[in-house]
Amino acid sequence: MDINPKFETKMADATYRELLQTYQGQLLPPDHVLTRHIARVTSRLLESSNLGTLRSVEPHKAGLGRTEDVAPGVGGREWTLMVVHDDKVPNAMTAYGNVVVFTGILPIAKDEDGLAAVLGHEIGHTVARHTSERYSSSKFLIIVVQALSALTGIDFGLTRMASTLLLELPNNRTQEYEADKLGLQIMAKACYDPQAAPAMFQRLGQLEGGRKFDFLSTHPISDKRTKELEALLPEAYEARAASAACAGMAKPRMGAGETEPLLGRTDDEFEDVDFNLWTNLISGPAFMAQIGGVALVVAIWASIFMHKLSLFSAHPLLNSLGIALLLESTLMLQPTNTAAQKRKGAIVHSILNSIAFLAMYSAFIIVIIAKSRKHEHHFTSAHSVFGIITYILILMQATVGMIQFYFPSLVGGKEKAKSIYKYHRISGYIIFVFIIMTAIAVTYTDFVAHVLKIRTWFVVLCSAFVLAGVLPRVEPTKFGF
């Protein structure tokens, strides 16, 4: 590579200005909660590896105002950060010490460990001067275009081409492996869990499907790459153990999957103090589940109150209320990741589930009394059969969940409780399916079909909306298999 360090510093300034122009109007301010969160993780990564500090997270209208003569990667220690508010772009990148993070990468990163994996990898590219390597490999083309531009006075799209060359062209496999290795070391020295790196790239690979994501186009994912990352983990954990700042941290749980879904980690030093748990109810596709759930509950309650009320009227009212609360408790807990989030989410989850439990079992007692008064037979319809199975499953689910979270000693201690929680999670989604089947089956009963006149297609449609909001937020890796 024949790129002069002074030239790289000029390219750092030019790239920064190009980034400002490209993303103007989309950059989050420095005091925004996401900017502060990302800046904290970035600073921790840089400082723990003695790579420098963040000079600024505030975009400037012109130039960098750099106090150094060289850029990061060639001796410079002043890094900058831009956070681009674009939830549809799951991407992050660095070029000559300019760190750019799109908000769309945060749900995939999941937590600080995942974000550290993304940023550590990108910082690794800068440390290894991969941007200059890509530039050097296409330098001849740039020189030709510059000459043509000087002779004719026509730009020939040079600015855009340079931006594409520096920021968008994929790294080769050797560069990716080198950035993976450096990234693991960087995040390990910052006391993050290196296991988050292969897990994060696995999630990216699962997201790809038929779509082409920016990060995936420049960071090709493969099973081989994931295995290579996993092979590097022992070395990364050694680096973390050797760091004085990481003294006393828990030993790595290699290949453990999600063995800590509710209680979190004992070595979570940095929590998302600004995390608003209630945003989980509408984040991502959750709004679709809300539409389906609200539409179904409103339809049931409206139909009930349009007719003469009786003791039996309380059965659908309480059951629909319980189902709505179960949906909210599921959406509340689904995206939680850090220990603090999980503790808060689990408490709210258990409270909502307890209220739902009381409502639904009150509904069960009421229907038993109502049918007994009329001397009607019990459990003669598909709805009643699905209903009794669902009631039993909910009782078992609630009992196990409460014991695991509040009384873990009854199952052998916290570690045992955490290790078996994946089964509790799986059974929760199975119960969800039984609830939907019960709700659909009720449309075939005489009371609903001929009195309330709630149609099967409507319940199916509402259920489809609920599933569309819940299923995309299910994280398979959390099942621990």
Image (cartoon, rainbow, N blue to C red):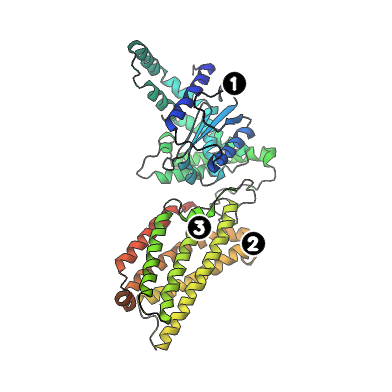
Q: Position of residue 30 (x, y in %)?
A: 55, 37
Q: CA distance from mark 1 to mark 2?
A: 55 Å
Residue toward you, 61 or 359: 61
Q: Which mark is residue 413?
A: 2
Question: Observer-nearest residue: 59 or 326?
Answer: 59
Q: Is residue 309 above or below residue 228?
A: below
Could you tell which of marks 1 and 2 lies nearer the N-terminus? 1
Circle 3: element type? helix
* Three-letter code for the amino acid on which mark 1 is drawn: Glu
Residue matched to label 1 = 68
Above or below — where is 304 with respect to 72?
below
* Marks 3 & 1, CB-CB < 8 Å contact: no
Q: Secondary structure at mark 1?
A: loop
For residue 102, side relative to residue 144 (left or right): right
Residue occupying image coordinates x 30% and y 65%: 457
Name the residue tied to disc 3.
332
Element carrying mark 2: loop
Is residue 108 visible from the viewing direction of this image?
yes
Q: Could you say which quadrant of the image residue 383 lies in?
A: bottom left
Return the disc, 3 or 2, that comes first in the chain's sequence.
Answer: 3
